[in-house]
Image (spheres, rainbow, N blue to C red):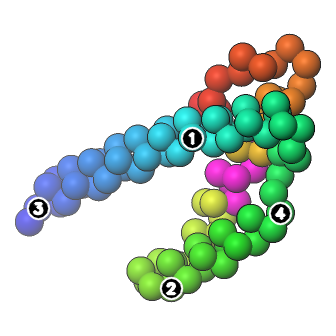
């Protein structure tokens, strides 16, 4: 296989990663709306701890550096929490999923 062919595969995987993130943000937007209407905190620390333990195990299982996975999901979750906080702010109830 050539470098060009391998890079085309990487480009396709990158596309899929971004597409999946978009789907994830659409779901977390719905969760944020529910949290806002139910007056729940934007951040669920117990859930986050459980998820980070799961991410650690998945990273080890797939031989991906756990520190990389931790950093990626930390950035994603921080973005989601920020979005959930915006949904709770007056006048921001029509806020769109994070972009």
Question: CA separation, marks 1 and 4?
Answer: 18 Å
Name the residue that disc number 4 marks: 45
Q: Residue at x 50, y 85 (%)?
A: 60
x, y percentage for residue 43?
83, 52
Q: CA distance from mark 1 to mark 3?
A: 38 Å
Task: Name the residue beneath numbered marker 3.
Answer: 2
**Mark closest to the chain's N terminus, 2 or 3:** 3
Residue pointed to by mark 1: 27
Judge depth for marks 1 and 2 and give the one in front: 1
Q: Are marks 1 and 2 in contact (CB under 8 Å)?
A: no
Q: Is residue 59 magenta?
A: no
Question: Bounds of the magenta span?
Answer: 74-79
Residue at disc 3, secondary structure:
loop
Residue lying at the far front in this picture: please name it: 38
Residue at 84 percent of width and 37 percent of height: 38
Residue 45 location, quadrant = bottom right
Res. 2 image quadrant: bottom left
Residue labelled with disc 2: 60
Q: Nearer the viewer, residue 47 or 34?
A: 34
| CA–CA distance in space, label 1 to label 2 | 26 Å
The location of residue 15, given as percent across then percent down, is 35, 43
């Amino acid at each position: 296989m050539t470098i060009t062919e391998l890079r085309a595969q990487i480009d396709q995987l990158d596309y899929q990663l971004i597409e999946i993130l978009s789907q994830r943000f659409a779901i977390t937007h719905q969760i944020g709306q529910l949290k806002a209407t139910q007056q729940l905190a934007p951040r669920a620390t117990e859930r986050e701890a459980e998820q980070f333990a799961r991410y650690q195990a998945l990273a080890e299982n797939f031989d991906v550096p756990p520190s990389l996975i931790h950093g990626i999901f930390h950035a994603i979750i921080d973005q989601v929490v920020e979005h959930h906080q915006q949904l709770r702010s007056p006048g921001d109830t029509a806020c769109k999923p994070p972009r």
